[in-house]
Image (cartoon, grey):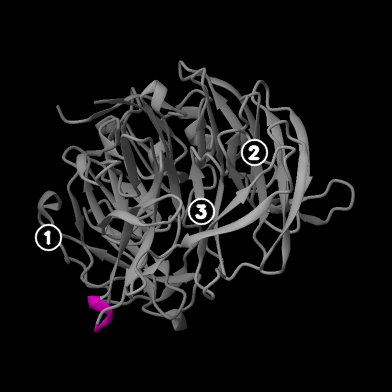
């Protein structure tokens, strides 16, 4: 029987979650829906396809369940429902940062979800209005920045049947009218509108950056708008700490699960001096019962957490100057400070789950500047802790493939790690970019199997039997941990619509995979073999 993966519940679910940061919410009583638009932010995307971070949603007026979710290449500047037909005109666009204004004029059928781009040339569409004579009036950007950023020219078009309007109907350069002021390209009251539509239940959520599943079934999560949040096994929120700045990044539960270590991102404003303080240099240990701060450690620069199953923890500052690694015992006492060479890259640290020892990637290794996988040997009363180089990150010195490191697990006598890969070609179009997953024998690093794909990687977790590779596309590939064979593929959906994962965590004893998405929801999945 193939491996099954079922979404049992969705934590943090709410109406309009799919659109991210809202910019428009327009009720349409005639056709029983609400048209909402927003921005999901930026996601690192390498490999197949392209990231479209803007969303247009059509929601049922009564239940607020999503009817259609459409990804847009450009931000939404205007939303105008047709006064009679089941159509809505949507203007999108942006300034590209160099010279041009780009965008589309989308005509969305509210019942079928069909989308037609009415522009024959890319241009930002800033305002829309249906006229009494049936024409669609619009305010278009100039072709380039010489025309002005805050102004546009008006144009009105007609067609015999808007329900069958063809693509490319509108030529932005056909007729030009005098330039007028553009005005706002978003609704400043949109959050109030969403709160009103949901009876005050809507709140802003964003990417779930990291997850941890505890023995009793609780889930810890970090994110853009939370310093830490906790969900009980039934999926109900236990507690949540609002972010003081740009939110938290990593969470690592202590061995006894009574507390968890958390790292942060960005800055906050000091209440006494009024100055900006770098939050990334602070690491806190917080109670998993109520989120109370139990310990606070200040480091030289943004820190990476490196944890082992026995409870040892290393805080690795990631600056490019020489720095010390702080080593903590399972009882959270500082045990040592180990000198480490400066980092040679800004890549995120290798994160190893289920590790018997403290593993990390850094450079240079013994053979030069190439990154190596190292181990920190912690000694409980039997001598000083030491740093030990294990093997190069690259398992094939003859290969020209360039590797970046990412998530990893220790599975028995193997280290299974994944990351982005890049292979140069004769031309730019021939170059290949994607994801690798490799199983390396410990402690010598011999490659047992290698799996490659052009799907962009979000996260990886698993055990000695199965490895779950979660992609930004919403696909989850289940690999055999012993052979690398693909056992199953699943596409994650919420309410019938694809999601964009950014983090994941697996709990083997609960047969449970939790997946954090870019819109702030957590998919709680059952894994059955």
Q: Secondary structure at mark 3?
A: loop
- Residue, x 42% and y 58% (percent of image)? 44
Q: Earlier in the sequence, mark 2 or mark 3?
A: 2
Q: CA distance from mark 1 to mark 3?
A: 50 Å
Report crowding for label 3: few under 14, some 14 to 19, many 20 or more residues within 10 A (C-alpha): many
Left or right, 325 with reference to 488: right
Q: Which mark is residue 350?
A: 3
- Read off the residue under disc 1: 166
Q: Does residue 521 lie above or below 22 as drawn? A: above
- Residue found at x 30% / y 51%: 71
Q: Could you tell me residue 237's position as x and y percent? A: 54, 21
Q: Position of residue 167 (x, y in %)?
A: 15, 62
- Residue 174 shows in the view: no
Residue 459 position, x and y percent, is: 41, 46
516 to the left or right of 108: right
State the SS at label 2: loop
Left/right of residue 195 with respect to residue 57 in the rendered view = right
From which residue to which does the magenta span run? 426-430
Whether the magenta-drawn stretch holds residue 429 is answered as: yes
Q: Classify residue 433 by image quadrant.
A: bottom left
The residue that appears at 76% across and 52% down in the rendered structure is 337
Q: Residues within 10 Å of mark 1 (few under 14, many from 20)?
A: some
Alpha carbon separation for disc pair 2 and 3:
17 Å
Name the mark nearer the viewer: 2 or 3: 2
Q: Nearer the viewer, mark 1 or mark 2?
A: 2
């Amino acid at each position: 029987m193939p491996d099954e993966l079922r979404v049992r519940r969705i934590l943090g679910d709410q109406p309009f979650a799919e659109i991210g940061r809202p910019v428009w919410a327009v009720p349409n009583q005639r056709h029983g829906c609400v048209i909402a638009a927003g921005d999901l932010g930026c996601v690192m995307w390498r490999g197949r396809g392209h990231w479209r971070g803007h969303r247009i949603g059509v929601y049922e007026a009564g239940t607020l369940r999503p009817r259609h979710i459409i990804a847009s290449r450009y931000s939404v500047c205007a939303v105008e429902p047709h006064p009679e037909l089941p159509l809505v005109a949507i203007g999108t666009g942006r300034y590209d940062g160099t010279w041009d204004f780009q965008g589309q004029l989308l005509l969305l059928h509210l019942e079928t979800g069909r989308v037609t781009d009415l522009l024959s040339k890319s241009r930002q569409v800033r305002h829309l209005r249906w006229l009494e004579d049936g024409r669609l009036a619009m305010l278009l950007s100039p072709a380039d920045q010489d025309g002005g950023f805050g102004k546009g020219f008006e144009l009105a078009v007609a067609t015999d049947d808007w329900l069958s309007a063809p693509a490319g109907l509108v030529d932005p350069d056909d007729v030009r009218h005098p330039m007028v002021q553009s005005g706002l390209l978003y609704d400043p009251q949109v959050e109030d509108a969403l709160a009103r539509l949901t009876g005050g239940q809507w709140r802003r959520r964003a990417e779930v950056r990291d997850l941890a599943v505890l023995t009793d079934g609780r889930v810890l999560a970090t994110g853009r708008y939370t310093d830490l949040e906790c969900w009980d096994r039934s999926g109900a929120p236990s507690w949540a700490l609002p972010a003081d700045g740009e939110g938290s990044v990593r969470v690592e539960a202590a061995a006894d699960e009574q507390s968890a270590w958390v790292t942060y991102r960005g800055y906050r404003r000091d209440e006494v001096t009024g100055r900006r303080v770098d939050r990334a240099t602070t690491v806190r240990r917080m109670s998993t019962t109520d989120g109370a701060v139990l310990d606070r450690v200040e480091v030289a620069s943004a820190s990476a957490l490196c944890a082992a199953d026995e409870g040892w923890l290393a805080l690795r500052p990631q600056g490019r100057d020489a720095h010390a690694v702080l080593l903590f015992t399972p009882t959270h006492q500082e045990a040592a400070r180990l000198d480490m060479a400066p980092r040679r890259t800004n890549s995120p640290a290798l994160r190893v789950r289920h590790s018997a020892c403290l593993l990390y990637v850094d450079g240079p290794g013994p053979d030069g500047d190439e990154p190596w996988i190292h181990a920190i040997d912690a000694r409980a009363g039997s001598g000083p802790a030491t740093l030990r180089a294990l093997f190069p990150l690259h398992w094939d010195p003859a290969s020209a493939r360039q590797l970046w490191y990412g998530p990893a697990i220790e599975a028995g006598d193997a280290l299974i790690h994944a990351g982005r890969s890049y292979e140069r070609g004769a031309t730019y179009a021939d170059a290949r970019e994607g994801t690798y997953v490799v199983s390396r024998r410990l402690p010598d690093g011999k490659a047992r199997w290698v799996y490659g794909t052009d799907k962009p990687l979000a996260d990886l977790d698993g055990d000695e039997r199965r490895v779950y590779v979660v992609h930004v596309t919403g696909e989850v590939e289940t690999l055999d941990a012993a052979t690398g064979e693909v056992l199953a593929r699943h596409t994650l959906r919420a309410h019938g619509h694809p999601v964009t994962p950014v983090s994941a965590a697996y709990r083997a004893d609960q047969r449970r995979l939790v997946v954090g998405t870019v819109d702030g929801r957590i998919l709680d999945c059952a894994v059955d073999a």
